[in-house]
Amino acid sequence: MNKSPKARLFCAAIALASVIAMSPARADDSQTISIMVGGISKFIYLPAKLADQLGYFKDEKLHVELLSQPAGVDAENELLSGSVQAVAGAYDHTIDLQSKGKEVRSIATFLQVPGEVEVVSKASTMKSMADAKGKTLGVTGLGSSTDFLTRYMALKHGITSREYSTLPVGADNSFIAAVQQRRIDAGMTTEPTVSRLLQKGDASVMVDMRTVDGTQQALGGIYPFTGLYVDAGWLASHKQQAAGLARAIARTMKYIHTHTPEEIADKMPKDYYGGDKALYVQALKSTMAMYTPDGKMPAGGPENVLKVLSTINPAIKGKHIDLQRTYTNEFVATANAS
């Protein structure tokens, strides 16, 4: 007996459903986790790319894509717009955003110190941040963490942000160009840009926050800097994926502390070397101490970050900030226990 068109359509749908049900499970595009990085080739974000290169995200059955913006504040905006699910950026943004009524949470910490360096151009008369008055200071972006830190260090010498100019110059080649073209007197940047400038003799180190001692001198204590943070709403509904991301980062931090700079460099894309692998390795050697051993937020770190931000950010000063809602060690602690 011939079936009606509706009956034939129904049978075809049932057959198709059976085929799909018997097919092996696979990830689809909706499962992709996009992570925006505030300058992917910077050493301060190295754990994100290294985790990807080592295959640790894949081990967690996660389909991760890493994207890059020149400044952390741009990466933050991508998260808030819903364009990405996570950001490899500075922890201080979680505090700044909470003061604005937005909640994001750090789930793994890359650095226990900023890893940032205030370099001064060889053409400038600056000797220290006390000489900032009337000068032009480079930052990655306005409202970025380098902007926060620059304002704090100048204010420590009694110089307000109205007494100098701040110029957003990005990172890597654009930062180097700003120094060489004398568009900035000094500026804040990271490795491997610092070593490239020093090698060429274009700049010298004025404030060094690549070490714990240097950070304590500049900022009065430990200062957890970059890590992986996500929107609190996304975290609540995607705990399994968040846990996978944190486990991958925790494994990566252990890898960093159990392998040589040469071995780590070998895992990174060759175009990150800037044409000079030896210099890349040398720069990495000078910054190994800045990485956390396990991805955990260091004790006392959030309190010092809040102290610094409260000094220079009117939106935070005097406002109650619940630091417990800005980060969690839950996932990295589980990873390290296993």
Image: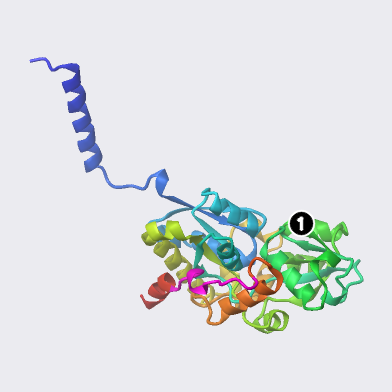
Q: Tell whether 280 sits left or right of 22.
A: right
Viewer-nearest residue: 236 or 322: 322
Residue drawn at the location 65% of the way across and 65% of the way down? 315
Residue lying at the far left in this picture: please name it: 1
Can residue 128 be seen?
Answer: no
Q: Is residue 46 above or below residue 216?
A: above
Report which quarter residue 153 is drawn in.
Answer: bottom right
Q: Tell whether 6 sits left or right of 265.
A: left
Report which quarter residue 157 is drawn in.
Answer: bottom right
Where does residue 318 sit, x and y in percent of width and height?
63, 73
Where does residue 36 sit, x and y in percent of width and height?
56, 55
Residue 323 among those drawn in magenta: yes
Can residue 249 be seen?
Answer: yes
Q: Amino acid at mark 1?
A: Val
Residue 90 among those drawn in magenta: no
Q: Residues within 10 Å of mark 1 (few under 14, many from 20)?
A: many
Q: Quadrant of the N terminus?
A: top left
Give the extent of the magenta segment: 317-329
Where does residue 206 sit, x and y in percent of width and height?
80, 75
Q: Number of labelled discs?
A: 1
| Element type where label 1 sits in the image | loop
Q: Quadrant of the C terminus?
A: bottom left
Q: Tell whether 206 sits left or right of 171.
A: right
Q: Tell whether 312 sits left or right of 132.
A: left
Q: Which residue is mark 1?
A: 169
Where does residue 329 sit, x and y in percent of width and height?
45, 73
Residue drawn at the location 42% of the way across and 62% of the way down? 242
Viewer-nearest residue: 168 or 97: 97
Residue drawn at the location 82% of the way across and 77% of the way down? 158
Our reading of the magenta stretch's main secondary structure is loop
